[in-house]
Image (cartoon, rainbow, N blue to C red):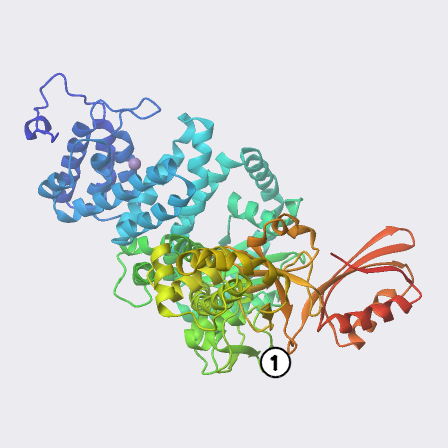
Amino acid sequence: MPLPEAKIFRSRADKKVDESHRPLVKSLLEKLGQYMDPASLAEVDLACEYGAQAHEGQTRQSGEAYISHPVAVAGILGEMRMDSRTIVAAILHDVVEDTPVTVEQLAEKFGDDVALLVDGVSKVSQLELDSRENAETSETASFRKMFMAMAQDIRVIIIKLCDRLHNMRTLGSLKEEKRQRIARQTLDIYAPIANRIGMRELCNTLEDLSLQNLRPKRYRAIKKMLANNSRGRKSIIDEACRKINVALHHHNIIAEVGGREKTIYSIYRKAKKQSKIDLRDIADINALRVITDNRNQCYLVLGIVHTIFKPRPASFKDYIAIPKANGYQSLHTSVFGPYGQPVEVQIRSRAMHRVAESGVASHWRYKTDATDESAPQQLAQKWLSSFLESQQMSPDSGEFIEHLKADLYPDEVYVFTPKGDIKRLPRGATALDFAYSVHSDIGNRCIGARIDNRPVPLYENLRNGNHIEIITSNRSRPEPGWLNYAVTSKARTTIRHNLNKQKTKQSVKLGHKLIKKALWDQGYRRLRIPSNHKIALLEALDLKDWPELLADIGFGKRLAPLVAKQFLAEVMLPEKTATTKRKNNKTNYGKMTIEGTEGLLVNYAKCCHPIPDDRIIGTTTSDRGLVIHRLRCPNTRSVMKHPDQFFHLNWSEKIKGNFEVLLTLTSRNQPGVLSELTNIIASHEANINKLTVEEQSGNVSRMSFVIEVQNRDHLADIMRELHLDKSVIKLQRAR
Ligand code: MN
């Protein structure tokens, strides 16, 4: 029900009107008065009254009138000197969500821009609720929608972040479980977003508040230790600052030099990453910052710092030449300080400092030029639109979240193409990711890479400054294993897409083989299946076309023997099939052969590791196609009871390639025994893919090898020679 205008404009003289919010509004207006014109202030005041009326009767968990929350959020935005439209929207940000007021009414009263901002924030809040109420699967979907709502206008994110900041500050009155959930969400979503758009100060506060709620003991321990430590650290930092100041003065450079506080969360994260128990090792790090007038001076200061203090090797990072994705610029170095202790030094210009602290918000706070390509606003906008684009390309929410998560984590590496262009990739990215980042086609056809002129495999991790060249071949195709070491969403999406295409093709082929074999077993003796027979079967199965059925069989979604049975029932005389069935099941004639070239849909079971010349059976599983086991593999026992669920298979005589097999071995502990055994295996030109050794008692070890062999003969040769080794007590091929 819409609010009647009259209610909004009740006269102040009306005794029933709750005036408790007035002091809050007054101090907000005073704060805003420092930078806002009277007309804007009047509008803010009007918004406060409108909001107070709309939320009248509602209270927060703490018992305060609800309006105190949006007014506080507006206050935080006021400290950032955000524009009046944003402030007005912040005051009204919960009105649409929690009261009968509509977006249309807000548009009429406060203008379209305010209404759009409120609408965006409301959508985000609504989706937060959805994701809590529904199952896990929809969480990713609603997170995606939530992100899209934020992506419309960067100010929606800024309001939402300040809303979250105030909620985090006032978590105290909520129940433990709810506090934890909100803190977790803040840490997982909002803090990384704040960081990604460069709002470092806000991000720090969100992180510390989250940690305080999630790990209160740990939080207090770090806080206490920081307080204790700071006295000892102070003398080191003071001395370092003094020396730097003297040298700068000598060179006529005016700069601010000062110690730098580490946040509690940053210490917690570092400790976790290095799995250090003793926090002092981490918190001991001394940090200081030099702020200069301009970019040029930053490099001069760096030179001076390096003359006074010896730089620590490989610790220098130039984020001025190559800014971080959110626009952050600074020089980072680490030196041996006054008493030989490490001191971390950041050097940046004043303008860089503003961006480092406030990111996108620096535009409003410092009235900077937002049209510059490298301005944080432009970078953030570019980032957001890249998501709007990718959402049209990939409808899968899971992929989207993967993409976003990879993106929200700031660790990145910078590498060079052969032409000298810089590519930015997430830390942990491999040569394969690089190939896909250049072009999907390069990725799909790559077979290897050269890093700094050295040949490397595709799974090689990239490091900052690598020069990378990709080697391609027209015959190469994406393989399932690639998914194990591609980390960027672009590579993963493209590989998956390609594998699915390959799979469908191969599943039709495999399905064709399987159905023919099943039909033969059941007495159908035609080499070609006439189309009227096909049509009859498709009609019975309610399917559209023949390849679709074959793909289903190849994928294992339908069992070939069952389809064959149905087929025969549809198209042939029942008695004819019944008599021939039994007899033919026994003969090997018509047995399907495995050639080793079937591709993705033929899998060799990891439990029994079949190799050529082993007696084998095949079972079909949904999605994985045909799985080949050795005849008496224990894992097939239940399947063997149902003739419809497995096939006897033959190895093709032409089969080539390497097949994994597992050997277990008990040996006496003697010096060099392991290298002796691996030498034997290597001398037979078999690869060792995996090796584990466990000592059993003092002088006996148990080892297991996964090795690659061509067939049973090859394996027998290797096992024979291993047996001859004096240290080997027991050797067998594992089932
Ligand atoms: Mn709110």
> Which residue has dot 1 on it?
454
The answer to whether 340 appears left or right of 557 in the picture is right
Whole-percent x, y for residue 612 in the image = 69, 70
Is residue 312 shown left or right of residue 698?
Answer: left
Q: Residue at x 50, y 59 (%)?
A: 577
The quadrant where ligand 1 appears is top left
Query: Looking at the picture, which amino acid does disc 1 mark?
Result: Arg
State which quarter of the image contains the N terminus: top left
Q: Closest to the observer: 238 or 680?
A: 680
- In the image, what residue occupies the spot 42% across and 42% down? 136
Nearest the camera: 135 or 198?
A: 135
Could you say where residue 622 lies in the image, as x and y percent from the top left? 50, 55
Tell me if residue 501 comes above or below residue 105 in the rendering. Answer: below
Residue beneath the point at 59% across and 51% down: 273
Is residue 196 left or right of 287 when viewed as pictured?
A: left
Q: Residue furthest left?
A: 6
Q: Is residue 222 above or below residue 192?
A: above
**Considering the image in quadrants, where does the C terminus appear?**
bottom right
Q: Residues within 10 Å of mark 1 (few under 14, many from 20)?
A: few
